[in-house]
Amino acid sequence: MTIEQIKEKTLYGDYTLLGQVMGINAPAAKMRFFRGDEIAKNALLKIIANREALIKEFQKKIKTGSID
């Protein structure tokens, strides 16, 4: 996935979480991502994938009425 494709999927807070994961501030994490840092790219991909999975999981639970 290219930087532009990843950028389209990012939401508010993703770079903040990326910064926390990398142990740096959010603007520095964002710049590392845009510079093509592989660690930043892989971490952001995981953040996006986990967010999307969490949303799907809870939407399914809401529809079936089985929220724990």
Image (spheres, rainbow, N blue to C red):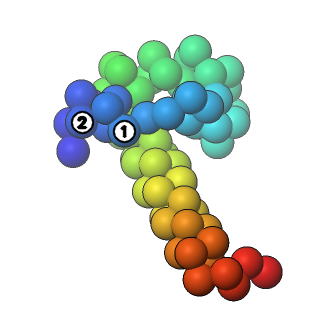
Q: Is residue 42 left or right of residue 28?
A: left
Tell me: residue 59, above or below residue 38: below
Crowding around mark 1 (Cα neighbors within 10 Å: few <14, some 14 to 19, many 20+) is few
Numbered circle sitting on residue 47: none
Q: Specify the amino acid type for callout 1.
A: Lys
Crowding around mark 2 (Cα neighbors within 10 Å: few <14, some 14 to 19, many 20+) is few
Q: Nearer the viewer, residue 30 or 23?
A: 30
Q: Nearer the viewer, residue 24 or 7?
A: 7
Q: In terms of image quadrants, where is residue 21?
A: top right
Q: Is residue 68 left or right of residue 45?
A: right
Tell me: residue 20, above or below residue 62: above
Q: Which residue is mark 1?
A: 9
Distance in Å between CA atoms under marks 1 and 2: 7 Å
Q: Residue at x 58, y 15 (%)?
A: 27
**Which image quadrant: the C terminus?**
bottom right
Residue furthest right in the image: 68
Q: Residue at x 56, y 17 (%)?
A: 28
Callout 2: SS: helix
* Residue 10 image offset from top left, x and y in percent: 43, 35
Q: Which residue is mark 2?
A: 5
Q: Specify the amino acid type for callout 2.
A: Gln
